[in-house]
Image: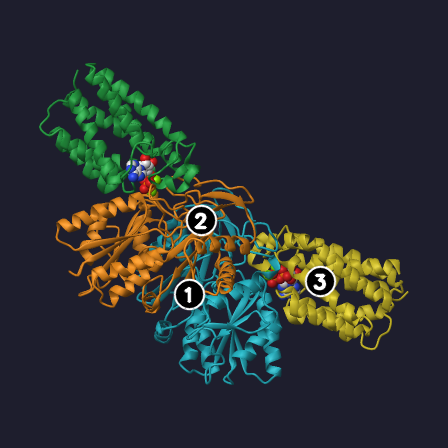
Chain colours: A cyan, B orange, C yellow, D green
Amino acid sequence: MKKIINQVENIVDEMLKGIVKAHPDHLKRVEGFNVLVRKDAPVAGKVALISGGGSGHEPSHGGFVGRGMLDGAVAGEVFTSPTPDQVFEGIKVIDSGKGVLLIIKNYSGDVMNFEMAAEMAEMEGIKVDKVIVNDDVAVENSTYTTGRRGVAGTIFVHKIAGAAAEEGMELSEVKRVAEKVIANTRTMGMSLGPCIVPAAGKPSFELGEEEIEMGLGIHGEPGTHRESISSADEITTHMVEKILSDIPFDEGQEVAVLVNGLGATPLMELYIANRKVAELLEERKLKTVKTIVGNFMTSLEMPGFSVSIIKLDKELKELLEKTADTPAYK
Amino acid sequence: MKKIINQVENIVDEMLKGIVKAHPDHLKRVEGFNVLVRKDAPVAGKVALISGGGSGHEPSHGGFVGRGMLDGAVAGEVFTSPTPDQVFEGIKVIDSGKGVLLIIKNYSGDVMNFEMAAEMAEMEGIKVDKVIVNDDVAVENSTYTTGRRGVAGTIFVHKIAGAAAEEGMELSEVKRVAEKVIANTRTMGMSLGPCIVPAAGKPSFELGEEEIEMGLGIHGEPGTHRESISSADEITTHMVEKILSDIPFDEGQEVAVLVNGLGATPLMELYIANRKVAELLEERKLKTVKTIVGNFMTSLEMPGFSVSIIKLDKELKELLEKTADTPAYK
Amino acid sequence: MLMNKEMFLKALELLSDRIIDSKELLNDLDTQIGDSDHGSNMTRGFTEAKKKIDMVKDKDFSTILKTIAMTLISTVGGASGPLYGTAFLKASMSVKDREVLVGEDFIKIHENVISGIKQRGHAERGHKTMLDAIIPAYEAFKESIEAGEDLKIASQKATDAAKEGMEYTKGIKAIKGRASFLGDRSIGHVDPGATSSFIIINAINDVIKEG
Amino acid sequence: MLMNKEMFLKALELLSDRIIDSKELLNDLDTQIGDSDHGSNMTRGFTEAKKKIDMVKDKDFSTILKTIAMTLISTVGGASGPLYGTAFLKASMSVKDREVLVGEDFIKIHENVISGIKQRGHAERGHKTMLDAIIPAYEAFKESIEAGEDLKIASQKATDAAKEGMEYTKGIKAIKGRASFLGDRSIGHVDPGATSSFIIINAINDVIKEG
Ligand SMILES: Nc1ncnc2c1ncn2[C@@H]1O[C@H](COP(=O)(O)OP(=O)(O)O)[C@@H](O)[C@H]1O
Ligand SMILES: Nc1ncnc2c1ncn2[C@@H]1O[C@H](COP(=O)(O)OP(=O)(O)O)[C@@H](O)[C@H]1O
Ligand SMILES: [Mg+2]
Ligand SMILES: [Mg+2]
Ligand SMILES: [Mg+2]
Ligand SMILES: [Mg+2]
């Protein structure tokens, strides 16, 4: 394992220090906690948004703290949900009295830890509510199981619900918008190879010279199945079709697209994939009003990418197009 | 070699199509050429800036086309300087009559091809001038050799000279500013492993499980030497010291920093390195007024990073702080 | 036989040490069907818990268990943090005012732990989680005690059942937790949480055996 | 003996094919001390050049060489594109109005090619570049022709000298081009550009040998 790190135990702390040093105008750290909040938190009269999860997904989630997106981001150990006390501290710091929306990705750990924090906040009289993001189409839907994972589509929740809060909407309204985003967002991911969780020190899985993992999440876990590598166009087509077959799209529907790198995929390759995504959506007569390409929700140094598509109505489109000013999204 | 690509011959073309699809508001492609230019090119009354080089450095250079930075970017094959006819076409499209500055990184190929393009442009009566970026401290200086490479510090030239042009400076003034940036910028890079040039299909070099390459450029070439991997702090200290010993810095000097990923290094690790860079500069009593962390000048999927430091005077600082609006830098 | 304070502290120390020693094993199991961190998570928690136990070792059973619970909740993270945190919290609530623990106490602990984990995680037996080790242990233990057998025997039977339950998770598909995203690919791997639960039960049994 | 139009076209075809066949070899050499693309660059250029030659093969020597030059300049890129482009352009200018080529023509071509490459790239002999194959070839050729030897002999001597010059690059440090950034680490590897130059000279010689 070769990584640019010092002691494995210090990774998260040192990373947070490095982020604050890089973006002193956008954010500050809650002293003694692994929590980043807006420089001007709490923002008076505004509903606050908090998100977070394990580390290793940078720029998620600290990179989206700033005007028009998140008020706070809580960082757990690498790929490990943060503990309730950390989340609770974040909630306390960002609440302006208008309430706090928790944006949780659908993992047992994230859900349980954030829920415990919400319970703690409620006990202190803070108004909190939550949404659970589950955009991953790779996992078949079932009421019996845990359900689907929350993956890169979470960025759309941060952006659009963030704009709603910035516009002055009440907590229940911001939650409604966030849930509309979740209901209309779908993501599919693939990978060319594993990543190495620093504390484990070993690759998360092994792939043959010609093998790829399809349908995988953002924690180095294996995907739904393996197949032989094919062309960028074939892979992308498979992913987009999986998404389009999961949620009905009418001709003329306006959409936004996120082609998200998992960490080690060159932007060159993401753009090559994006070319095909654009072509496929044009063929289906969908109208892409915004395209985002880059590393937004990563899985350490995993080579691979995901495609997210969100169906936009007038409200979501307007909120998506509002400016935001965060380290990783402007 | 596992990559998200189709036919190797089509990589550059498909990538450019994908960029244009992602950023239709910022840029357009010159039809029939591997040249991206500002959507509103030529910009009346403004000196135009053109840069470029081989592909594989994304977001360089197309990602920096937009208001306040480049007017045009020419993309060669992967790691191969673009040909003079391509550069010439770019010059013609962006020239508004105020002249064009060529920003060239110091490689024989880039220099020769851009120079030939400049000759062609002059023959057509277009006012052109050039600057050659050579920020890499890894290569010892010598008037006898080719000199030093141009690497990630080029971003500062794009940004600051771009702001100068946007402010309405004349060609000679923009050139003066660009040369001041070059004279005050230093970069040092390292890598944990090779990249694979698609057409070659093999790793650019091989490293042992515990080895790193120090002092390498952005084309997958080996560096100046190999050593055993050490901690992020030790590596970063070595790099920063190499820079600080190359150019005199007085206490209280204002600087800007770029911690640049080479493609496959997680942002997490870049931030960990940045924490140490900030600490070292504070120890030296240097004043960091701007820090940029991310993938800006990459080397395909190479794991590794570089540190660039620029000494700022009042003029450079003001120009650096002007807003820019490009796909990769805002 | 019964468990006194000395045995109680010894059990807590041993189970912490065993978890810490199993870090790599648990990470490796989690690499197969999860995100490679179960060993790191548990080790972080129990390393901290050991320090905290030392500070409250003169207090009563309930306080000690509550200290462990709060430490796990604030250091482990992931899915296992809230679950083991809840488990120890429920155990703490089950032993209020007790100065020694007998068979019935352990039955009560088991019952509260299981209902706490179920409440927090919404999982059931057969979902390929820690419950697949804990519930069989509870059933075997209860049956043994109710049949009038000694704590030593009941504890051994509970441990054997936990082991069997842990091994059983290898053959089933995950319904809850991160491994559930793998679908059928989760079959063929032992669940890391069931393994850590077995390790804990086994450590307690080793102390009871000797006592 | 002399080189007629038929031999001339044959030489151009053979040298193009030889370059294309050496793609991997040249990429591999460039991987050692450069950026792995010399073979790809040259192959791209000469594949295109072959098509263009076919379209102008009825024209005079100078036009054909100029066509190759312009094709290389607009397709090869990198350092080798402008340099080989310049080389063919200078060769083109050296054979204006010639219908066959004799020893003196080749001397003139060599001289112009060398001065063109030097002007464009500011390199000298011993800098570990294509010049280290071309200049020795020129010197051997000139000496042979001036000693009154036949074109066949002079061409063979030039080829042997080019080969020696190419091999000589292995032992020296690069001063110009991308390999110069490696400093001493460039020692021990043959220069890819010197190799492609040898391949071209050798292909021309093979046609002269047969002719
Ligand atoms: N809902 C749940 N109920 C009970 N146990 C669960 C649940 N979700 C996960 N687990 C247990 O937690 C273990 C994983 O813990 P850990 O790896 O530390 O957390 P994470 O899955 O968040 O990375 C699983 O092996 C499983 O036994
Ligand atoms: N200034 C120069 N003068 C002469 N030859 C040069 C010069 N620079 C580079 N070369 C030749 O070009 C070769 C490399 O060509 P190529 O790999 O195609 O271009 P690049 O170095 O731009 O990738 C070198 O091996 C060397 O022989
Ligand atoms: Mg985890
Ligand atoms: Mg090259
Ligand atoms: Mg886990
Ligand atoms: Mg090369």
Q: Where residue A238 sits: x, y (%)?
A: 41, 53
Measured Cα–Cα span from mark 2 to mark 1: 33 Å
* Residue occupied by mark 2: B302
Q: Assess mark 3: CB under 8 A from ligand 1?
A: no
Q: Secondary structure at mark 1?
A: loop
Under mark 1, the amino acid is Gln
Q: CA distance from mark 3 to mark 1?
A: 46 Å
Residue placed under numbered mark 1 in the picture: B253
Discs 3 and 2 carry the same chain letter: no
Q: Nearer the viewer, residue C134 or D63?
A: D63
Q: Residues within 10 Å of mark 2 (few under 14, many from 20)?
A: many
Q: Secondary structure at mark 3?
A: helix
Residue C142 visible somewhere in the drawing? yes
- Is ligand 4 less than 8 Å from the beta carbon at label 2? no
Please state if A252 lies on the left or on the right of C7 as rendered.
left
Q: Viewed as shown, does residue C46 lie left or right of D195? A: right
Q: How far across and how far down the image is residue C146, in percent?
A: 86, 66
On residue C47, which mark appears? 3
Give the mark toward the camera: 3 or 1: 1
Q: Does the beta carbon at disc 1 come under 8 Å from ligand 2?
A: no
Whereabouts is ligand 1, in terms of quadrant? Answer: bottom right
Spatial CA span between label 3 and label 2: 37 Å
Q: Chain of mark 2?
A: B
